[in-house]
Image (spheres, grey):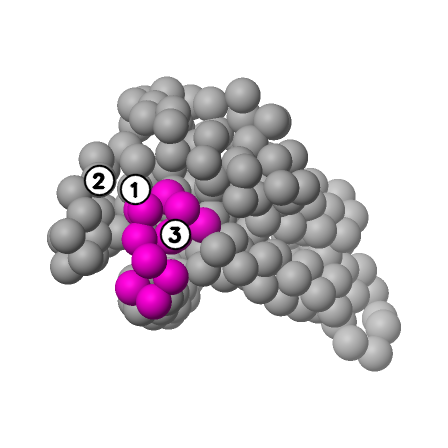
């Protein structure tokens, strides 16, 4: 089921959104079959990339790596943050839906949030080879596709006219951007508490 939806969202998203809308999975099943696994991709790849592959600063020089303990702490926290972020976005989507006379279940809203974020999870594979340019290309590409899924999938998933869904999707996008800034601020706070990168 999980792989079929991932492939479907990449190959034929409109048809896949109809299929996802009819599922009505529980939150537990959704996390077990989709979110836990896909959120682990950037976390596991980030761990491998920062501890084994390493990276160099612009201009060359020595290869930098993180200690195994430091990388593990950061990657586990990132994995948890992604799972919490999907749930929080689902809650906001459910709350915003009331403005458009829709009353979707929280599990459906979390499903929409998770499937919209699928390209971002998959882009985490790029963390196997830590590189600023690769991260930028993967990040911009995956975020762009996620935004395209958001605007294209919302009218299907919420059964809304395109004019209303555009406003709804724009509100979701704004909340997502605010959440990203909040996560960056929380990261800075963690680093201030000495929960940050330690280099070999």
- Seen as rendered, the residue at the extreme bottom is 59
Which residue does the numbered mark 1 point to in the structure image? 109
Name the residue at 47% across, 39% down: 17
Taking depth in this image into account, of 40 and 107 the one nearest to the observer is: 107
Q: Dot 1: few (<14), some (14–19), or many (≥20) neighbours within 10 Å?
A: many
Q: Are marks 2 and 3 in contact (CB under 8 Å)?
A: no
Magenta part, dominant SS: helix
Indicate which label's residue lies in the foreground, 1 or 3. Answer: 3
**Sequence-wise first label, 2 or 3:** 2
Asked if residue 16 is among those painted magenta in the image, a careful observer would answer no
Q: Secondary structure at mark 1?
A: helix
User: Residues in magenta?
Assistant: 153-164
Does residue 41 sit above or below 27 in this rendering?
A: below
Tell me if residue 114 comes above or below residue 153 in the rendering: above
Task: Compare marks 1 and 3 and give the one earlier in the sequence.
Answer: 1
Q: Secondary structure at mark 3?
A: helix
Q: CA distance from mark 1 to mark 3?
A: 10 Å
Which of the labelled discs sits on residue 154, or is there none?
A: 3
Q: Quadrant of residue 106?
A: top left
Rendering coords of residue 132 (x, y %): 71, 68
- Describe residue 105's horizontal placement relative to residue 16 as left or right: left
Tag of residue 104: 2
Q: Quadrant of the N terminus?
A: top right
Dot 3 surroundings within 10 Å: few (below 14), some, or many (20 or more)?
many
**Res 75 seen here:** no
What label does residue 30 carry, if any?
none
Q: Nearer the viewer, residue 200 or 109?
A: 109
Q: CA distance from mark 2 to mark 3?
A: 12 Å
Image marks 2 and 1: residues in contact by CB distance under 8 Å: yes
């Amino acid at each position: 089921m999980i792989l079929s939806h991932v492939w479907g969202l990449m190959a034929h998203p409109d048809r896949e959104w109809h299929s996802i809308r009819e599922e009505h999975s529980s939150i537990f099943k959704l996390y077990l079959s989709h979110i836990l696994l896909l959120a682990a991709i950037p976390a596991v790849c980030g761990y491998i990339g920062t501890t084994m592959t390493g990276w160099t600063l612009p201009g060359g020089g020595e290869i930098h790596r993180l200690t195994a303990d430091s990388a593990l702490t950061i990657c586990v926290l990132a994995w948890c943050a992604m799972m919490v972020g999907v749930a929080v976005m689902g809650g906001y989507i459910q709350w915003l839906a009331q403005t458009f006379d829709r009353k979707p279940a929280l599990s459906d809203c979390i499903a929409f949030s998770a499937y919209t974020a699928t390209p971002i999870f998959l882009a985490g594979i790029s963390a196997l080879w830590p590189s600023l340019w690769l991260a930028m290309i993967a990040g911009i590409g995956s975020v762009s596709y996620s935004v395209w899924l958001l605007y294209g999938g919302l009218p299907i998933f919420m059964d809304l006219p395109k004019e209303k869904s555009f406003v709804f999707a724009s509100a979701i996008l704004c909340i997502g951007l605010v959440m990203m800034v909040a996560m960056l601020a929380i990261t800075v706070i963690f680093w201030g508490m000495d929960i940050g990168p330690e280099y070999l």
